[in-house]
Image (cartoon, grey):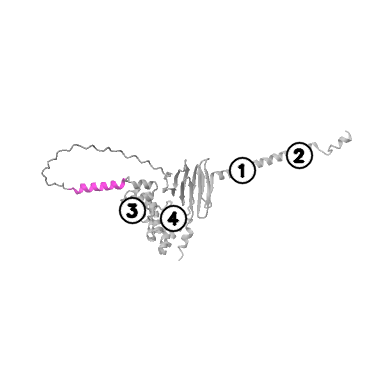
Amino acid sequence: MSEPLLEHIDVSYDAERGYVGLQRRIKRRRVTRAVGVAAVLALGFVMWPRASVELRTDDGSVATRLSPETELAVASDRSDAVELELKRGRGHFEVTKNPQRRYRVRSGAVTVEVLGTAFDVTKLDGDASEVQVNHGLVRVRWPDGETLLHAGEHGVYPPKLEPKQPEPVVAEPVAAEPEPPAVEPTPHPAVEPTPDPAVDGHAHRHARKHRELAPRDDGWRALARAGKHREAFGALAEQPVEDLEGLLLAADAARLSGHPREAAEHLDQLVRKYPDSAPARLAAFTLGRLQLNELADPQRAARSFARAYALDPKGPLAEDALAREAEAYRRAGDRARAAEVAARYLALFPHGSRRPEMSTFLAP
């Protein structure tokens, strides 16, 4: 080989060593590329479901997207309130119970507010939304009304009012030919039938029971169901209400239109008349809140909260009812009873949300 060509050849080059090194470099690149792809996939696996399925707020509440098209965002997350916005699709919400922090979900023209429960909201066409309560209690608001939904209840809001049926046109009667005057018969004294107390008393009791159990189709009821509580309260006036549904509607109409005393009367009547019904539990609790906060009657409030706890000691309102009973006695100046109820609360709910407050009631 000529000298000029040798100047361009690396005589120290080992063909076998170079081949082995090349293989190692190729293998390292493949491993690096595989690790990178795996890392990206792992990152996507960790982040994608969490970002696309769940939204967790600082209080521990979880909002879950239930459909691929669901668009859900946190509008605000403060120490006293959480607000989410459901723009489309369907979401499930598990809310951590915290009386000091409101939790709201806005969906079109509808706002759902809770203190501790689980519920579903489905955004429908337009401003309407469907709300389904799994457990607990929620308040549903829309521009011209609001309502309360209990566990197992659902509805579409704003509600659609049934169109009024046109009144039938009544033809004017045709004037009849005048008849000749009739001859008056000779009057005889009327003989009243002798009443049968047993028969008449049974008929009266049966009619009264029927009136109590069968809800009347009064106009104020339709207004109350539509969330027009002020109009419903005005239309109700002094009408007697005896049935279970009517007492619930009348209490809501009075309470939500700014008449707590009248609302308390309806709630008290419901609890006394239908103590074994499911609504009686919530009615007793709501009655206690009205008496404590709006009627300034903590002694009666304590008794109402005790009744609410006794009606459902393992229900969703039990913990709060017991804590509010202690609070009511405290506000009434009965520190001994407040300490007694607070001790029961701490024994039954050692990890309850109002444990720090109840502990202070035990201090002498």
Q: Is residue 276 visible?
A: no
Mark 2 surroundings: few (<14), some (14-19) or many (≥20) residues within 10 A? few
Sequence-wise, the earlier of marks 3 and 1 is 1
* Residue corresponding to mark 3: 269
Front residue of 120/21: it is: 120
Residue extending farthest to the top is 1
**N-terminal of the two: label 4 or label 2?**
2
Residue that badge 1 annotates: 42
- Where, quadrant-wise, is the C terminus in this rendering? bottom left
Task: Single out the mark in the foreground, 3 or 1.
Answer: 3
Residue 181 screen position, x and y as percent = 14, 40
Residue that carries the numbered disc 2 in the rendered image: 21
Q: Marks 1 and 4, how far apart in space? A: 44 Å
Magenta residues span 195-214
Vertical comparison of 10 with 266: above or below: above
Q: CA distance from mark 4 to mark 3?
A: 22 Å
**What residue is pinned by disc 4?**
320
Q: Residue at x 41, y 58 (%)?
A: 293
